[in-house]
Amino acid sequence: MSIITFPSAAASARPETRPARPSLLGLWLQRIRTRRALAALDPHQLRDAGIEPWRLRHETRKPFWRG
């Protein structure tokens, strides 16, 4: 018979140790998602957001490692 163990309440109650700022990989992934979302907007949505078409092209053509 195998023994099943469950994590203790003390282990689950300890706070997560997350970095104060996002990791480089996380930052790159956020830039990719944001630029894809911007590229998916239609012209009406861009006008509502106050984004000029040339600015959109400039932003979406940047590689993810450039801020």
Image: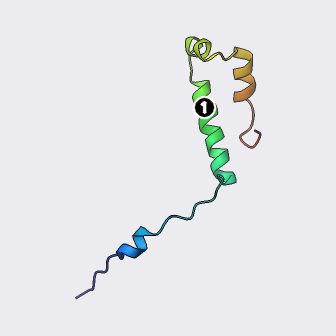
Residue 20 is situated, as x and y percent measured from the top left of the image, at 64, 56
Rendered residue at 66%/54% (across/down): 23
Residue at which label 1 appears? 36
Q: Is residue 14 shown left or right of residue 35?
A: left
Residue nearest the observer in this picture, 15 or 41? 15
Answer above or below: position of 60 versus 64.
above
Q: How many discs appear?
A: 1
The image's colour scheme reads: rainbow
Residue 4 is situated, as x and y percent measured from the top left of the image, at 28, 81
Q: Is residue 16 shown left or right of residue 28?
A: left
Which residue appears farthest toward the left when viewing the image?
Answer: 1
Residue nearest the observer in this picture, 30 or 14? 14
Rendered residue at 73%/20% (across/down): 55
Residue nearest the observer in this picture, 13 or 39? 13
Residue nearest the observer in this picture, 21 or 33? 21
Dot 1: element: helix
Q: Quadrant of residue 66?
A: top right
Rendered residue at 58%/60% (across/down): 18
Work out which quarter of the rendered image holds the C terminus and state it.
Answer: top right
Q: Quadrant of residue 13?
A: bottom left
Answer above or below: position of 48 versus 30.
above
Work out which quarter of the rendered image holds the N terminus and state it.
Answer: bottom left
What type is the residue that disc 1 sits on?
Answer: Arg
Answer above or below: position of 9 versus 23.
below
Residue 11 is situated, as x and y percent measured from the top left of the image, at 42, 74
